Image (cartoon, rainbow, N blue to C red):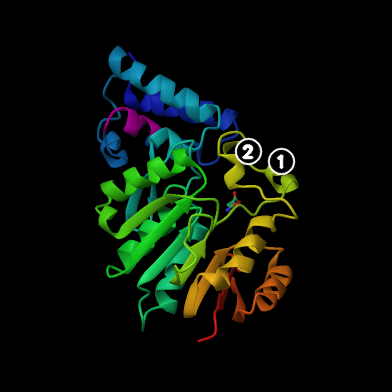
Amino acid sequence: MLTLLDIVKRTTDFFAKHGIESARLNAELVIAHALGMNRMKIYLQFERPLTEKELESIRPLVKRRAQREPLAYVLGTAPFGDLTLRVDRRVLVPRPETEQLVEIVKDAFAATPPVRILDLGTGSGALALGLARAFPAARVVAVDASADALALAQDNAAACGLAGQVEFRASDWFAAIRADERFDLIISNPPYLTEAEWAEAQPEVRDHEPKPALVAADAGCADLLKIIAAAPRHLAPGGSLFLETGIDQHPRLLEAIADAGLIEGRSIQDWSERPRFVAAMLPR
Ligand code: GLN
């Protein structure tokens, strides 16, 4: 008879053999999810033998994770700030850097909350929903070029109770934004990896996440530069642009920001002290 602890140990070894970091934690989370319990609860049942039915529910999830499918896809959800978002292969798994971007924007707008917000390339809806939660009086327009991503983002908005605050549109960057629409805040986490960075990424990223959401042409700058060039037409006077970026791109992006007529262009570091975000403002 195999106990829960036996299965946790075997799965840990299996994951480690497949190069998965924090193999024990991954094993506990996947097994707890398959059994419909939280991770702490499995500690109380380690000596319990598992039924064949329980083993059957665990196996396919263990197999998926061993194939280096991201943990969040296997569990079906990812935390983002105080929200829980559904995620699957239609969208990127939200990253800690993007959670940090919400915190940076909360601080920047602490005195005067933004009323109109535009999130470009919303994916799972993470930035749009995090900001809708942070600024309850704001109306958010969230766009994505992927209809699949938008469908998931819409589900997430409903599940978070934020559907009333967010309008979703299929749009290639600003394509579906009307000429007269202006925002206090335009935000984006666009694709910014180079092909070379993508080729060296972990299998979770390279083999499972949607490549169009990760990789951009022109040293990873192509989409960032498009957004910077068009942002002045859709920012309200005094409105701000905040972008998540790669860490080697800032000299070029800050130059493009100045060329676009935006002011106060600045580079902001992430928690690992890498230049990860740029911000700028349209003159009043
Ligand atoms: N930060 C992500 C990664 O390194 C890339 C996200 C993006 O391209 N927007 O995998």
Please give the residue where the numbered disc 1 appears in the rendered image: 199
Q: From where the camera sits, is residue 274 visible?
A: no
- Using the image as rendered, state which of residue 154 and residue 47 is in the foreground: 154
Does 41 appear in magenta? Answer: no
Residues drawn in magenta: 30-36
Query: Which residue is at the far bottom?
Result: 284
Q: From where the camera sits, is residue 212 visible?
A: yes
Q: Sequence order check: which comes first, mark 1 or mark 2?
A: 1
User: Helix, strand or loop at disc 1?
Assistant: helix
For the residues bearing labels 1 and 2, Cβ distance under 8 angstroms: yes
Q: In which quarter of the image is residue 126?
A: bottom left
User: Helix, strand or loop at disc 2?
Assistant: helix
Most common SS among magenta residues:
helix
Left or right of 246 on screen, residue 20: left
Marks 1 and 2, how far apart in space? 7 Å
Please give the residue where the numbered disc 2 appears in the rendered image: 206
The spot of residue 43 in percent (x, y) is 30, 36
User: Mark 1 is on which residue type?
Assistant: Ala
